[in-house]
Image (tube, grey):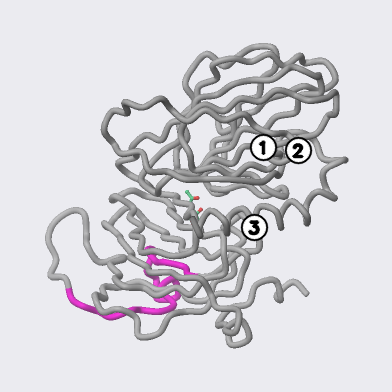
Amino acid sequence: MKVFLYMVAVALAWDAIHCFYMPNKEFGHVRSSAPAQSWFPRVRRLSRPAHRVIDPTEDCFLVTSEEGELFFKSPSDEPSVCGIYMIAEPDKRIEVIFNYLDVPCEDGGLVAWVDGWELNGQVWPADTWDDDRVVETCDQRPQRKLVSRQNAALVQYRVPAQGKGFAVTVRHIRNARPCNVMVFGSEGVYTLRNHGETGNCSLLTISPSTMRVLDLNVGQTIKKGHMLELETGPIHHCTKRGLADYVDIGGASGLDHTKMEVLDSVCGLDSNEARRAALIACEDTVVRLVSSGQYYNSVTVAFAPLPAEDIERADLLCGFNDM
Ligand SMILES: *[C@@H]1O[C@H](CO)[C@@H](O)[C@H](O)[C@H]1NC(C)=O
């Protein structure tokens, strides 16, 4: 419950900060506020799914980790842009079905499914963004199930017609190979893996955090053939040493982790827990695993909220480079 309250606070803060941008912003990119709880087991649900009516005055920026049905009916002809920011457990994807949609295209009426999150002009996950991630519609309900590639997705809407609206059913479905993960709340242990693939995977927590590497296996476990695995300890400046696989640890001032500020870059094999946690005083804390595809890489990190009194002695304070 603490987690959820924190998220709401964050959301409200965002709302306050970013609402100034809204009037001249094109659709497709919103902000809003609100609740969450997720305790549905993997077994078939017998109870009726949660049913919730979005209150446009309170829930324009709605952050939710619930499954169930959401219903929106526009209270006025105001062309305000709102969003439902959905988040699930790290090993889940989000599935959305539009059960009903009655949004006239006149006056800019629009509903969009976004496979990811967008906030203040920044998208996540930015490095795998493509046009397929956004499906816009009005008048016609998307017929197919919309499924996200990671554990966060967004429905944005602008319904400038009183009484018009839409209904969606949200489900969380299993993701056997999570790559990009957004963490809801600011405490936990998470393992990021490349599953032997080429490309980048990332973990983003929307809060200033302390971050400790518990286990590191990057650029060591070769996919083909056998090699004696030696405990190298953490190796720093891997790219300078010509090593293509590494983990960047740092923070970002927004959802776009490709613009992250890097505190430390490590690779190697190290099963000893880092002695000291990194204190990262940024809007978002980011761990980014870069993989050549030649190795099975994994990194396990523990993170916790950064206590306010530690901000002064933080290892990384974001936003000072561009000043
Ligand atoms: C992964 O990250 C590296 C280093 O930032 C970058 O050069 C590369 O283009 C990225 N790969 C993909 C698929 O985004």
Q: Magenta segment, which residues?
A: 230-249
**Which mark identifies residue 57?**
2
**Which mark identifies residue 18?**
none
Which amino acid does the dot numbered 2 rest on? Thr
| Sequence-wise first label, 3 or 2 | 3
Q: Residue 147: where, in percent of width, then height?
A: 46, 30
> Is there a contact, CB below 8 Å, between mark 1 and mark 2?
no
**Which mark identifies residue 83?**
1
Packing grade of label 3 (10 A; few <14, some 14-19, many >=20) is some
Packing grade of label 1 (10 A; few <14, some 14-19, many >=20) is many
What residue is at 65 percent from the left and 32 percent from the top?
A: 54
In space, the residues marked 3 and 2 are separated at their CA atoms by 16 Å
Picture layout, residue 262 above or below residue 314: above
The residue wearing badge 3 is 9
What residue is at 59 percent from the left and 37 percent from the top?
A: 154
Residue 261 within the segment the image draws in magenta: no
Taking depth in this image into account, of 133 and 80 the one nearest to the observer is: 80
Secondary structure character of the magenta stretch overall: loop
Which amino acid does the dot numbered 3 rest on? Ala
Quarter holding the C terminus is bottom right
Q: Is residue 158 left or right of residue 100?
A: right
Picture layout, residue 316 above or below residue 154: below
Residue 251 visible in the picture:
yes
Direction bottom: furthest residue: 313
